[in-house]
Image (tube, rainbow, N blue to C red):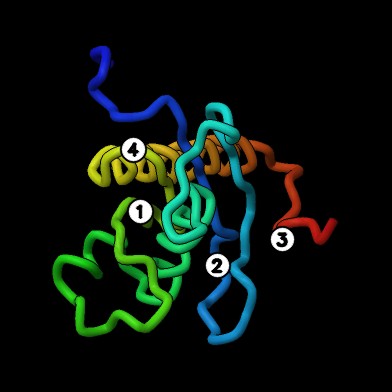
């Protein structure tokens, strides 16, 4: 990327566990979180930081089954008190990812790339399992 193309050298990524339907009052089903950059350099707004925003974007997508951009730009009437009003989340193949720290369009690009990479990697392993005639017919429980 060009120098100064993105506005910060940090990024926070939250990926939710696929396949868990939204239910009010249930904790966000976080599969993993990843931080890039120095947290001590992060800015805060109203006591919230990039990790809070990334989780908020992912939570909105989990509840609405849409990218946060899709909700904010086309379904604003569905926003509830406490919802994150920034966009930067994506859903690809059921994988929900929220990203925060740079411009919203870049947050969404990085979220989409993360979700797509997970789906692609999973497809690779599914193909490997399909080629193995001795593979179990059901995914192992442990």
Q: Quick one: label 4, few (<14), some, or many (20+) residues within 10 Å?
A: many
Residue 123 vs 85, above or below: the answer is above
| 47 with respect to 138 (left or right) | left
Q: Nearer the viewer, mark 3 or mark 4?
A: 4
Q: Could you tell me how far apart the alpha carbons at marks 2 and 3 are, in whole angstroms?
A: 16 Å
Q: Residue tagged by mark 3?
A: 138
Q: Quadrant of the N terminus?
A: top left
Residue appearing at x 23%, y 43% in the figure: 105
Instruction: Examine the image and state in which quarter residue 111 appears.
Output: top left
Q: Nearer the viewer, residue 80 or 93?
A: 80
Q: Earlier in the sequence, mark 1 or mark 4?
A: 1
Q: Quick one: label 2, few (<14), some, or many (20+) residues within 10 Å?
A: few
Residue 85 vs 52, above or below: the answer is below
Could you say which disc has been placed on residue 102 in the image?
4
Could you say which disc has been placed on residue 90 in the image?
1
Residue 104 vs 68, above or below: the answer is above
- Asked if labels 3 and 2 touch by Cβ distance under 8 angstroms, the answer is no
Q: Nearer the viewer, residue 71 or 115?
A: 71
Q: Earlier in the sequence, mark 2 or mark 3?
A: 2
- Asked if labels 3 and 1 touch by Cβ distance under 8 angstroms, the answer is no
Q: Secondary structure at mark 1?
A: strand
């Amino acid at each position: 990327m060009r120098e100064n193309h993105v506005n910060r050298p940090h990024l926070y990524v939250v990926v939710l566990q696929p396949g868990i339907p939204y239910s009010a009052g249930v904790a966000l089903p976080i599969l993993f979180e990843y931080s890039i950059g120095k947290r001590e350099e992060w800015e805060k707004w109203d006591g919230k930081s990039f990790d809070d925003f990334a989780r908020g974007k992912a939570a909105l997508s989990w509840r609405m089954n849409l990218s946060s951009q899709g909700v904010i730009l086309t379904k604003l009437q569905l926003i509830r008190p406490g919802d994150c009003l920034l966009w930067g989340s994506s859903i690809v193949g059921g994988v929900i990812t929220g990203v925060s720290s740079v411009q919203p369009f870049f947050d969404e690009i990085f979220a989409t790339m993360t979700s797509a990479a997970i789906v692609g990697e999973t497809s690779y392993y599914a193909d490997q399992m399909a080629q193995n005639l001795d593979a179990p017919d059901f995914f192992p429980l442990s």
